[in-house]
C-alpha cells in the first residue's frame, strides 16, 4: 500500500482534469406567495364591489306580531289496569353442606 501523504510521482504524460458543474443559485420561492396574496386581494375587491353595487346596507326584517294558539284537546286517558304483584325473588340461602 502507498502512503496517502506522499506526493504523486512526476509523470507529465498523465494529466487529470476535474470538471465541476455548479448550477446557478435559485432565487425564487416568492412566486406562489405572490399568487396567493394577489388572489385574496381580487376576492376582497369583488366582495367590496358587490356590496357597493347593492347599496351597502343590509335591510333588517320588519317586526311582526305572531299570535299562535297551541291549545291541545284533552288526550284520551289510559284505562285503569289491575295492580300486578311483582314476581317473588328467591332469597339467598347458604348452600346445604354435603
Image: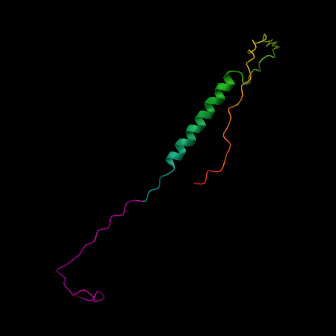
Image coordinates for residue 74, horizontal then vertical, percent: 79, 11
Relative image position of residue 58 (x, y in whole percent): 73, 23
Q: Kindly identify the residue that appears in the image at 24 percent across and 86 percent down.
A: 8
Residue 69 vs residue 56, the one in the foreground: 69
Rendered-image quadrant of the C terminus:
bottom right
Left or right, 73 with respect to 47, comes to right
Where 14 sits versus 47, above or below? below
- Residue found 31% across the figure and 88% down from its top: 5
**Residue 56 sits in quarter:** top right
In this image, 77 relative to 18: left or right?
Answer: right
Q: Say which of 87 and 55 sits in front.
A: 87
| Quadrant in which residue 72 is drawn | top right
Q: Residue at x 51, y 50 (%)?
A: 30
- Residue furthest front as drawn: 98
17 is within the stretch colored magenta: yes
- Picture coordinates of residue 82, whole percent (x, y): 73, 20
Residue at the top extreme of this rendering: 73
Residue found at the far left of this picture = 13
Q: Nearer the viewer, residue 57 or 19?
A: 57
Left or right: where 2 falls relative to 89: left
Query: Is 91 covered by the magenta stretch?
Result: no
Q: Residue at x 28, y 71 (%)?
A: 18
Give the magenta range. Answer: 1-24
Q: How many marks?
A: 0
- Residue 22 horizontal/vertical position (percent): 36, 63
Colour pattern: rainbow
Amino acid at each position: 500500500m502507498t502512503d496517502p501523504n506522499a506526493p504523486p510521482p512526476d509523470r507529465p504524460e498523465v494529466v487529470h482534469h476535474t470538471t465541476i458543474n455548479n448550477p446557478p443559485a435559485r432565487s425564487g420561492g416568492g412566486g406562489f406567495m405572490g399568487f396567493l396574496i394577489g388572489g385574496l386581494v381580487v376576492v376582497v375587491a369583488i366582495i367590496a364591489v358587490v356590496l357597493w353595487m347593492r347599496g351597502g346596507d343590509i335591510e333588517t326584517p320588519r317586526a311582526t306580531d305572531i299570535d299562535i294558539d297551541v291549545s291541545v284537546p284533552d288526550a284520551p286517558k289510559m284505562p285503569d289496569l289491575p295492580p300486578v304483584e311483582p314476581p317473588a325473588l328467591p332469597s339467598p340461602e347458604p348452600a346445604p353442606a354435603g
